[in-house]
Image (cartoon, rainbow, N blue to C red):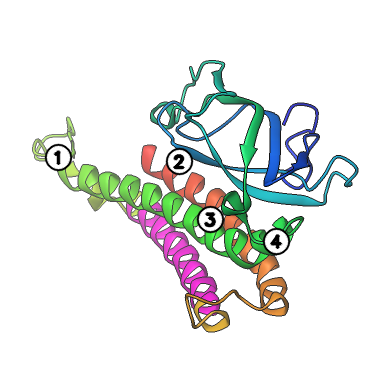
Amino acid sequence: EPGTGGNFFYCNSAAEKVDGGWTFSATKPVATSAPHADYCFCITRAHPDAPGAQLSFFMVPCKVDGATQIGEWDTVGLRATQSSGIQFTDVRLTDLNLIGSEGGFAAVALTTMLPIGMCGFAACWLGTAQAALDAAVAHVRRRTHQFSMPGDEQGHVLGSYESVQRQIAEAGILLNQTRAFLYDVAGRIDEAKPDASSPMPMDRAMALADSALSLRVASGENAVEVTTTALR
């Protein structure tokens, strides 16, 4: 929300309790697929007197009176997500729109969104890096470096040079190390939540939080490094 500095666990808006549910008013400047979404997930303070970090999690309808698309999505990257903003004004919500308990967003985030979401981010970035490396390998196998020296008119493919082989190998090792990290975190999530219909215990979620966040950072940085090597 505007004025929060991008803090995911803080909101200025609040859900106003009324008969049969809540009214919800908020400015959400970035909402993934906003022009096409029927609902979007929103966090807001549990009530007007709640501190900024005591949040409720709602599935808010986007195609109702009081929900208005705002802004344009004219970016360099991620253009297809169309993540323009939505202005919500006195949108009525019921218990069916509440995810988890009132004021219970932190528990939902720690037990589902954080560990699984970080694995999702990592998988996307690793897939991008793998595609870049695959393209680089295909290029160095195909591209011939022509020499002007007599007797060597045919030249050699770029992949035959030791310096190129070393860069490709180092990028592949880094990619596989990061993929192993992803598989380790994903496996620990499966162990902590063996039953998909039951919530993950909070103590196990807390134990996974640091690893999940570290995975997000490492996978992003390593994917950039691998992709940069491939582009070179």
> Where's residue 143, x and y in %?
18, 39
Between the C-alphas of marks 1 and 4, the distance is 68 Å
Residue tagged 1: 155
Q: In which image quadrant can residue 35 be found? A: top left
Task: Tell which tag, 4 or 2, sits nearer the viewer.
Answer: 4
Pointers 4 and 2 in contact (CB under 8 A)?
no
Task: Tell which tag, 2 or 3, sits nearer the viewer.
Answer: 3
Pointers 4 and 3 in contact (CB under 8 A)?
no
Residue tagged 2: 228
**Number of numbered labels in the structure image:** 4
Q: Residues within 10 Å of mark 1 (few under 14, many from 20)?
A: few
Pointers 1 and 3 in contact (CB under 8 A)?
no
Q: Is residue 73 above or below residue 169?
A: above
Q: Earlier in the sequence, mark 4 or mark 2?
A: 4
Judge left or right: residue 211 versus residue 186: right
Which label was assigned to residue 219?
3
Q: Residues within 10 Å of mark 2 (few under 14, many from 20)?
A: some
Amino acid type at mark 2 = Thr
Amino acid type at mark 4 = Ser
Between the C-alphas of marks 2 and 1, the distance is 26 Å
Q: Earlier in the sequence, mark 2 or mark 1?
A: 1
Q: Look at the image and give the residue range highlighted in magenta.
A: 165-189
